[in-house]
Image (cartoon, rainbow, N blue to C red):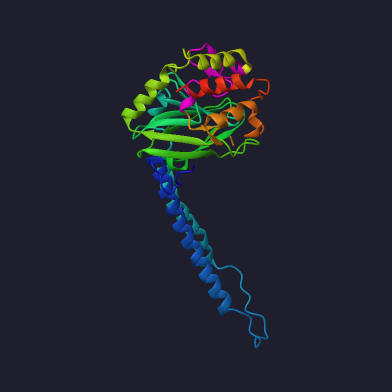
Amino acid sequence: MPSGTMFDPVSPAGKALSDFFWVVLAIGLGVVILVSVLTTYAAFKYRRRDNLKTEPRQISGNFRLEVLWTASPLVLLTILFIPTLLVMGATDPTPQDKDLQPDLEIIGHRWWWEFRYPKEGIVTANEMYLPVGKKLYTRFTGGDVIHDFWVPQLGRKMDTIPGHNNFLMLQSDRQGYFSGVCAEFCGAQHAWMLISVYVQPQQDYDTWIQKEKIPSPNAVPSDPILARGQQVFLNNTCVNCHAIAGTGANAQVAPSLSHFGGRKTLGAGIVENTPENLKKWIRNPWDIKESVNMPAYPQLSEDDLNALVAYLEALK
Ligand code: CUA
């Protein structure tokens, strides 16, 4: 589900960018209108007339005009340069911020987002949470190719580049849901790297942190069906790529499933996270999202698959 556009910003950086857009647009429009009117006027006034038999007067150079059309763009660009500097200041972390440890790390993968909250030891995917009104110093990096994190209402885009760190302050002054996309072509499923941002009051955010910090109560279940699902997970190649806190499965190749049941979507937003969709996904992920790295599991028995789905959905 898409949220608002950059014209409805929710952060100081987003507001600075949005306001700047209107300033540039107004100046640009002014130039377009002025040039169009003058061109139309000149074309009309100096149009060819049949009674004109001689060539027009030949001229070369006009000092006043040349100064005018050199100086006016210079003045306009100088005027634009000032808000540009201010916007750069508003959208980049300040030098003091740069000494801080990141509160959040965002890693772009083909084709999903990894969100790490290093101070709390939380790793999750595709759906991130922010406390309303707080700045989170965020580090961006890439897992495979270059992706580009863009949640228009939060402000500027930021590339996630393998082997390189970029930094940004993420902040939202409004509660609610804000969505974003990958803005750098990164392969077949570039279009399906939905970013879901949930901005909550501090108290709710703290509750989310507390829940995510520890293994799901169902990670090691007592219910026999869920326990069977856990065994299916641990005895198959799922563990080569996925982590589930509390089970010993700690691979970090694919999205962490520690609290998978709490996620609203599957495959970075391509379908809703329902047991039916999850079942279809495990049977053959390419039926839902072609070209993803996860292999199909046609060999799982129906009962094993149902138990696995029940287990994963119970990880809240
Ligand atoms: Cu990731 Cu485009």
- In terms of depth relative to the viewer, which is nearer, 200 or 272? 272
Instruction: State which quadrant residue 294 falls in.
Output: top right
**Can residue 224 be seen in the rendering of this structure?**
yes
* Picture layout, residue 280 above or below residue 19: above
Judge left or right: residue 201 versus residue 183.
Answer: left
**Can residue 95 be seen in the rendering of this structure?**
no
* Picture layout, residue 28 above or below residue 241: below
Task: Return the residue found at the far left.
Answer: 203
The residue depicted at 38 percent of the width and 23 percent of the height is 209
Disc tally is 0
Is residue 197 part of the magenta span, yes or no? no
- In terms of depth relative to the viewer, which is nearer, 270 or 225? 225
The quarter in which the C terminus is drawn is top left
Which image quarter has ligand 1? Answer: top right
The residue depicted at 67 percent of the width and 84 percent of the height is 54
**Residue 37's x, y, as percent?**
51, 70
Task: Return the residue found at the far bottom.
Answer: 51
Please state the extent of the stretch shown in magenta in the rendering.
238-262
The residue depicted at 62 percent of the width and 38 percent of the height is 185
**Residue 195's x, y, as percent?**
50, 35
**Residue 33's x, y, as percent?**
49, 66
- In terms of depth relative to the viewer, which is nearer, 273 or 10? 273
Judge left or right: residue 29 versus residue 60.
Answer: left
**Residue 135's x, y, as percent?**
37, 32
Q: Main secondary structure of the magenta part?
A: loop
